[in-house]
């Protein structure tokens, strides 16, 4: 494996990443999360899209059950049948036997559990019979990080991976997955917490890219970066305080890290990156939409890869 320190100066100039302020508060995060989930469900109803999905396996489409699962028996059976559940919403303070069984199954599957007020469950509910529990099922099956590396090996290409640090807008996630596919990336990695999962809105916005682009979900994005460095990958993240992207060497095995729509890339993840890239901006506002920034940087990587051949 290459000596990372010896190659670092050849890949980037000196830079100093700037930390962005504004740590997210738990209550504010919960409120945004609930609004997102409601928006996703509304978008699903508006489009008439009650079922959507495909497994990453040669692009073969397969029907997926409804995204929203309500009621104690239905949710418990969803877990026991092996269905991928992104989030579980449970009535705050409810600790009876059936609810305990459901939360126990959720922990076995490392599902995020949100304890919320009855009013929130009522807002999320479609049938009005949630019985104190609602599960949000993934519209598509998740891949493993190893699947993404294998996809690169099968094509005989150096890995090109998108890593998304807390993308919360399902439309942004879908657009980034679409860009990843068209830019020739081998997959996308998202965190389990504080980020949107593979919802029906994401599937629709990706315009079919989810049929061909594997998406892996990991518990710790910073630890995943460290693991992928051992596989020879270099990591570049987008931040206004970085080096101009045109001055960087973005060829070879690379991971492109894109941050949250409001706070950008988190401090710990940014510190794990080898390079920090900035996009030149000449207008009056200070930042690009996350999916647009991902597209600009992705195609600079594509340009350099084509030039290196």
Image: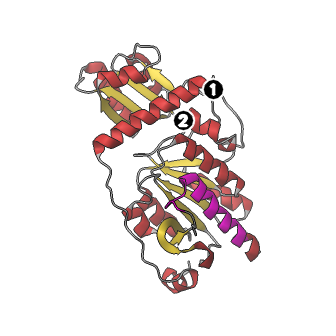
Question: Is-magenta flag for residue 296?
Answer: yes
Question: Which span of residues is magenta-colored?
Answer: 284-305
Q: Specify whether residue 161 is in view.
A: yes
Name the quarter where the C terminus is drawn.
Answer: bottom right
Circle 2 — which element? loop
Q: Nearer the viewer, residue 110 or 271?
A: 271
Q: Classify 188 as above or below 132.
A: below
At horizontal 49% and vertical 31% (from top left) the residue drawn is 39
> Would you identify the image quadrant in which residue 112 lies?
top left
Q: Which mark is residue 83?
A: none
- The residue carrying mark 2 is 199
Decide: few, some or many residues near mark 2? Use Cα within 10 Å; few <14, some 14-19, many ≥20.
many
Which secondary structure is most common in the magenta stretch? helix
Question: In the picture shown, does residue 147 fall above or below 210?
Answer: below
- In-front residue for pair 99/121: 121
| Residue at left offset 48%, top offset 67% | 240
Q: Is residue 245 left or right of residue 135?
A: right
x, y percentage for residue 147?
60, 52
Counting from the top left corner in percent of width and height, residue 200 is at 58, 33
Q: Residue at x 55, y 83 (%)?
A: 7
Mark 2 or mark 1, which is nearer the start of the sequence?
A: 1
Residue 29 falls inside the magenta stretch: no
Element type at marker 1? loop
* Residue 64 falls in image quadrant: top right
Question: x, y (%) of residue 177?
Answer: 62, 48
Apparent side of residue 89 relative to residue 257 in the rendered image (left or right): left
Label ID, residue 47: 1
């Amino acid at each position: 494996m290459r000596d990372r320190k010896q190659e670092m100066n050849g890949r980037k100039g000196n830079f100093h990443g700037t930390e962005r302020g504004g740590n997210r508060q738990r209550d504010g995060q919960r409120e945004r999360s609930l609004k997102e989930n409601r928006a996703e469900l509304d978008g699903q109803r508006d489009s008439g899209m009650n079922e959507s999905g495909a497994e990453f396996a040669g692009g073969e489409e397969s029907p997926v059950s409804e995204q929203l699962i309500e009621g104690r028996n239905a949710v418990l059976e969803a877990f026991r049948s092996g269905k991928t559940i992104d989030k579980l919403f449970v009535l705050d303070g409810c600790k009876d036997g059936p609810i305990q069984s459901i939360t126990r199954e959720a922990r076995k599957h490392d599902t995020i559990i949100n304890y919320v007020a009855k009013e929130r469950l009522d807002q999320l509910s479609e049938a009005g019979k949630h019985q104190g529990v609602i599960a949000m099922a993934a519209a598509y099956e998740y891949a493993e990080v190893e699947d993404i590396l294998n996809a690169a090996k099968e094509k005989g290409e150096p890995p090109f991976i998108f890593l998304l640090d807390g993308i919360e807008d399902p439309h942004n996630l879908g657009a980034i997955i679409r860009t990843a596919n068209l830019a020739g990336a081998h997959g996308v990695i998202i965190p389990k917490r504080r980020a949107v999962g593979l919802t029906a809105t994401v599937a629709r916005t990706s315009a079919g890219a989810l049929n061909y682009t594997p998406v892996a979900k990991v518990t710790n994005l910073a630890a995943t970066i460290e693991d992928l460095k051992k596989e020879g990958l270099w990591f570049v993240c987008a931040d206004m305080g970085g080096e101009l992207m045109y001055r960087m060497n973005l060829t070879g095995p690379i991971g492109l890290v894109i941050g949250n729509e409001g706070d950008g890339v988190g401090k710990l993840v940014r510190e794990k990156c080898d390079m920090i890239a900035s996009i030149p901006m000449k207008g009056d506002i200070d930042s690009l939409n996350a999916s647009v920034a991902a597209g600009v940087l992705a195609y600079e990587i594509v340009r350099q890869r084509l030039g290196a051949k």
